[in-house]
Image: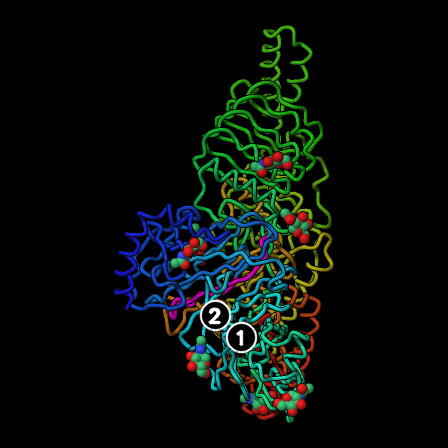
Amino acid sequence: MARILSTMSLSAGLISMSVFTLVLQLNAQPGFINIDCGANAPNHDTSINMTWTTDSEYTTAGINAVDESETAFFYIPAHTQNTIRKFPGPRNKSCYMLPVVRNKTYLVRAGFIPQNPPPEFDIFIEATRIKTVDSFNGDVVEVVLKATRDDMYVCLVRTDPSDVPYISSLELRPLDPGMYALVEKGYYLLRMDRKNFGADKLSIVRYPDDPFDRIWLGENAPGTTINTTQPVAPGSASNKPPMAVMMSAKLLRGSQYPPWLANVDYYVVLYFAEIDARMNSTSRRFDVSLDSKPWVVDFSILLASGSSGLFTTLQVEKTYAAIAQVTNLTFNPCVDSTGLPMLNAYESYQIFEEVQGRTFLPDAMAIENIKQQYNLSDWSGDPCFPYPYNWLACTLDSSGPRISTLNLASMNLSGPIATSIANLTAVTTIWMSNNLLSGPIPDLSQMKSLSHLGLQHNSLTGEIPQWLVDLPMLQELFLQDNHLEGSVPKFGNKQLIMNISGNDILCEGYHSCEEISDRTSAYRKSHVLSIVVETLGCLLVLMAIYVIYRLSRNRCNRHMESGKKMDKQHSFQNHTQVFSLRELRVASKNFSKKIGEGGFGPVYYGKLADGQEVAIKVSNGISKQGQSEFFTEVDLLSRIHHKNLVSLIGYCQEKDNQTLIYEYFPNGSLRDHLYGPSATTPLSWNTRVHIALDAAQGLEYLHLACRPNIIHRDVKSSNILLTDRMEAKVSDFGLSKLALQAEGVSHISTLVKGTAGYLDPEYYISQKLTVKSDVYSFGVVLLELVCGRPPISMSLSNPNKKLSITEVVRPHLQAGNLQEIVDPDLRSDFSLESMWKVIEIAMTSVEPKENHRPNMQEVVQELREAAAIEQQRSAKVGLRSDGRQSNASEVTARGDAFTDTSQESMGSRYSLPSPR
Ligand SMILES: *[C@@H]1O[C@H](CO)[C@@H](O)[C@H](O)[C@H]1NC(C)=O
Ligand SMILES: *[C@@H]1O[C@H](CO)[C@@H](O)[C@H](O)[C@H]1NC(C)=O
Ligand SMILES: *[C@@H]1O[C@H](CO)[C@@H](O)[C@H](O)[C@H]1NC(C)=O
Ligand SMILES: *[C@@H]1O[C@H](CO)[C@@H](O)[C@H](O)[C@H]1NC(C)=O
Ligand SMILES: *[C@@H]1O[C@H](CO)[C@@H](O)[C@H](O)[C@H]1NC(C)=O
Ligand SMILES: *[C@@H]1O[C@H](CO)[C@@H](O)[C@H](O)[C@H]1NC(C)=O
Ligand SMILES: *[C@@H]1O[C@H](CO)[C@@H](O)[C@H](O)[C@H]1NC(C)=O
């Protein structure tokens, strides 16, 4: 079928090519865009009298391909089916950009002919995910929305890195103002159904019968068809259904079952026109109900559409949250009605209420400009959604997504620095180092949030601009290895980390330059003299630095920061000690016993002179650039004391080494005890709940009691350490932040940090870190405790697919199938109520939307109850009442919790959170 179609349309295409320009002028439908994706030349469709163009004007992504599937798909114009556009990468997101008029309503229609094997990918309109494309059955995705910009994105986003998204056709249709008025509120409408009742099942009404080119399919519901030849007036129907559709209707009785999804909001429209001239206002009256709830009652089309009732269109609409997979739409005549209920046409749309706004317009325009200037056009669509371009990071603020980081380091850029960067006023960090950039540093003085500017290793010329002094947030400035010249602005007492070495005339040894430039201005008249003085001054200062360096060499607590001596201000509160590198070498036997590796760096075992065992965490190559952050952070960490948090004992900052010294716990981490190689004795449920409670209290303290609040960022079972009494202590808080700052300085960083399996999906998308990201990760830890399995595991059915613990657990929970989930090592020896409670907390904690998750305080509260319940039970069945020393052999045989309460009745207490 497809083969015949394609040869036919191929020859049609050849003919139409020659008359293309003529045709284009003839049938130019204002604002219609018809893209025959993958086509090599424009072509004309005589059946609907429209011309189809190639992709070239609308996307630079992807390649043309011939469609190899054998199926035809009647919803998509036949002649566009022989080619498709494929998007093999490397980008995960490929977009079309359609020109639109701001504030106008549009219908976008994307066609996907069935493929085998079917690739997996999502379609996004603007920055909002619409759905996963059904590439197996073929799909036509139609969305009605209001344009908010002068262009509109239609993007295909792969969900499996090995798949190749594709598209067959793409159409854009402007609608009249007032049509589908819900879009005025900013909602998007995704078409579910659009049916022409009374028409033959295979009939299609579209352009030119429908001037907006909606596609109305015939409907084969049982019932009598009625039709008329008399024109039907548009009436007050704001959606303007075409007359061709309204001239036929079906006499219905009983139920229709539109296949909607449960818990989804729908916009439902019924179109009526009385086309039987024998009817009067009382003779045809009926009720319509949705899922057995009355919608219209004692309804007379003629009465409702006014005196001119006959042959006039009437629109009846409703928004409705479907309660079941299949909705029951019922038509019943009133008892004294002589006519049967009738329906001319019907539409239903899924309502997208949570539309993701596009990136703040001035930011987006600047990024567009940067892409053009540096030829980065294969990054397409919204810069921030669904995830930022690799070289950007974004934040959300009241004006929408904003660009916060621009990381164009080592991307082979040449030419001047794009002046449009200055329009990115929310950017805090710019890295453009290691490129071939030339010319002066442009005026970035309006970038009031800028804290890190790295332009090192380029060929920049001109002076170091004076406005840098006035940037209120500036913390780090790297300009080394350029051809900058002239004097250096005076930064005064500002805490600034700066490197301007390796420039043409600027003085080396940068901290001295301030003083030098003072003198330079005093001796302006005599260049020779000033150069002499400059050189001398440099020498003097270099000597001074050397002397200080020698002095500080073996003492950690004296160090240089921004060229100034750090005085007593870093002798931290409490008993945080300062260690020398030499002491640590001795304690760790020259770092011989490595006990772990964290985000911060390797961890070594050590024993201090007084016999205390410690864990020594050595930063992996944080350069001195991260110094001020290091001290801020150590200062903060040294003030935190809580029984469920691992305490910082001391630190060492010497040469380029930054080291933190922590309490050591020989008993290892929770992970080791759950399923690590040393997990020999299974932990009892009582122990597990108490460990969970301990850890939760530690996190609660970080979130609530600390000022500023501390987000852990890397909550996981291997960061929960156990004492010999099986009490839990959370470790490694604050370290991800340190690692993050350090990395940002030295090389490209994607700002999202965390461990796979524990990472909050919302944080991953928005890059906006909140305490709820920790709650998510903690929810995963709870699931590990319940299941006794790692957060990510191989799928049994497909060894190449990795499954997250939530994916494993959810379907079993929905089926109420607890035994499939719970760690078999627990041997049913637990209180079912306590278990359900923990599962419930875990599942709400891993809700995709952060505002659906509990806070840590609520988690602690629930865990406390779960622990109390289990404590009671285990005391009853004869466990030692302290319960913490788990010992499986002590468990008595009667610990069968399933006898107390039937699993079913407990299962029903658990209701899965709604998917929205
Ligand atoms: C095609 O459309 C053009 C302009 O809208 C019109 O002039 C022409 O008559 C149409 N042709 C057919 C066959 O309908
Ligand atoms: C595409 O997405 C995958 C994960 O789905 C990721 O590993 C990869 O880095 C992404 N590629 C690009 C170019 O963004
Ligand atoms: C679009 O609509 C908004 C709000 O309704 C209005 O503020 C804006 O001026 C309109 N823009 C154009 C170009 O009509
Ligand atoms: C109208 O209905 C009559 C009989 O019900 C049928 O014969 C005729 O083909 C229909 N006309 C159209 C245009 O559907
Ligand atoms: C409507 O038509 C019915 C017969 O079909 C008739 O009995 C009734 O009186 C009419 N009602 C009015 C208001 O004309
Ligand atoms: C549909 O609703 C009608 C009444 O509104 C009811 O009589 C019928 O049983 C319902 N059908 C189903 C399958 O629920
Ligand atoms: C940057 O902002 C200025 C002033 O608002 C504007 O005139 C200019 O067009 C913007 N440039 C870009 C590339 O967005």
Q: Is 25 on the left-hand or right-hand side of 653?
A: left
Residue sitting nearer the eye, 900 or 76: 76
- Look at 68% across and 66% down and name the residue there: 855
Q: How many marks?
A: 2
Q: Amino acid under label 1?
A: Ala
Q: How far across and how far down the image is residue 461, in percent? A: 52, 22
Give the secondary structure at mark 1: strand
Decide whether the magenta segment is chiefly helix, strand or loop: strand
Residue sitting nearer the eye, 377 or 312: 312
Q: How far across and how far down the image is residue 41, in percent? A: 33, 49
Residue occupied by mark 2: 216
Q: Is residue 12 above or below residue 501?
A: below
Give the secondary structure at mark 2: strand
Q: Which residues are magenta?
A: 130-147
Residue 462 among those drawn in magenta: no
Marks 2,1: beta carbons within 8 A: yes
Whole-Å distance between the Cαs marked 2 and 1? 9 Å
Precedes in sequence: disc 2 or disc 1: 2
Quarter of the rendering occupied by the N terminus: bottom left
Image disc number at residue 345: 1
